[in-house]
Image (cartoon, rainbow, N blue to C red):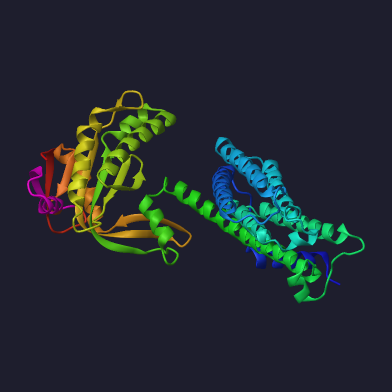
Amino acid sequence: MATKSQKLSLSQSVSQFMFGPPMTGELPERILKDVRNEQNKSESLVGWIQLMLVCIFSVLYTLSPKMSAPGAFEAVPWALGLYFVLTLVRLVASYQCALPGWVLMGSIILDMGLLMTLIWSFHIQYDQPPSFYLKAPTLLYVFIFIALRALRFEPRYVLLAGGAAVIGWMILVTLVITADANDPMITRNYVEYMTSNSILIGAEIDKILSIVVVTLVLAISLQRGQLMMRRATVDQVAARDLSRFVPREVVDQIAHAEESIKPGDGVSKFATALFTDIEGFSTLSEKLTPQELVYTLNEYFGAVYNISCKYGGTIIQYHGDAMLIFFDALTDKTDHAGNAIRTALEIHENLNKQTFGGGITMRTRCGINTGAMTVGTIGAEDLLIFTIHGDEVNVAARLEQLNKEFDSYIMISAQTKDTANDFSPNQFDFEHKDDIVVRGRSAPTRIYTVHSNIT
């Protein structure tokens, strides 16, 4: 005999087979809010489709020939009119607020009850025995009503719609069988069933089974889809939050990678690196409390971020008060060297005159170099960072430090100058400072400052 744990394991296996692996842990409220917002939008979509359907049915009914007896009661116009009013009210309400579950459940039962009442009225309208309405093709609308509930991505509403349809049809079949105790009008002859008002119990069971199967298939599909949607929502929110910690380009690379990112994955690009550093930051740090320092730095970093974004730069790294900004050669027409220079110039001309954190001026030194750089990930298998590295990046860092020796704020290499001039000659005013052997290199590097942007 199976133990309780074995039964639980079996039920879990069946559940995973049908619905997929469950999510671990509870979803944060911010993610649940996103899910609810999407479901509320779906309810408005359901309302519009229902409104469209009732308009189509009304047109078809108006254009179709009327075969009922003169003066007979016609339930269709009343049913369509009532359904139109209810649909319109729900649609307007869905834009005003999130409809509570009890309202949705009540409206589903009301919709299905209205449809069943309409089908029931056919034998009165056409002056036929009750079994007449069981053959009405209007039953097919049941599947439309059930399918509409799938738009909200909540299985419980599909199950409720299917359950209401099954119960409604069973009531209609029961009413036919019990309408005349002396003649239940039941037959086992299929031809007689098709050519008369007799009823075939097997056919009615087939209809009920069809409703049940369609309902269950939709509900299982929705449950699987809901789990996938929640996982996707978690991933989307995580990616949105992750983009605040790492560059958006990194998030996109991770999201679209064919395989998981590994240490050392990267590509070599001809690009430009810009290093920034705040002059006298150590002295400034001594005068501020840790909270004041963090506040001031955040305000400063935000200003630099806005400027770098303006010129297509990506902030790769913060290190104390220093920043590493990357300008990528996305296409042959990308002026990455010129954009790095423009960024440095705007930082020098604008930010060096601004105050941060309640009146503090922070003057920024910049070093820029252009060349072949590796863009990718480094670190341990389970803890990676995205960065740019290579000798050309190191040169940019050395150039930033050389500003102290030459009493300047922007220092660039000859390679950056030439690359910028190749893209658009004479766009900047360069001043040659020296040919100097940068630490870590044996050959001298020609270095320049940029006084102003003349474009």
Q: Quadrant of the N terminus?
A: bottom right
The residue closer to the viewer here, 399 or 14, is 14
Which percent across, then down, holds residue 123?
75, 56
Left or right, residue 141 beside residue 399: right
x then y, percent, for residue 212: 72, 63
Which one is in front, 240 or 350?
240
* Closer-to-camera residue (98/443): 98
Circle count: 0
Q: At which x and y percent is residue 43? A: 58, 46
* Residue lying at 63% horizontally and 43% vertically, measured from the top left: 81
> Residue 152 at what x, y percent from top left?
59, 51
Find residue 158 and report its image quarter. bottom right
* 332 versus 409 height, above or below: below
Residue 207 lies in what quarter of the image? Answer: bottom right
Which quadrant is home to the C terminus?
Answer: top left
| Residue at far top of view | 359
Q: Which residues are magenta?
A: 416-438
Q: Is residue 133 visible?
A: yes
Q: Residue at x 28, y 47 (%)?
A: 313
* Residue 399 at least partly seen: no
- State yes or no: residue 434 in magenta: yes
Classify residue 254 as left or right of residue 54: left
Task: Determine whether 313 is above or below 330 in the image.
Answer: above
Drawn side of residue 378 relative to residue 130, left or right: left
* Residue 441 is covered by the magenta coloring: no
Residue at the right extreme, as displayed: 182
Question: Residue at coordinates 52% horizontally, 55% vertically from top-left?
Answer: 232
> 224 or 176: nearer the eye?
176
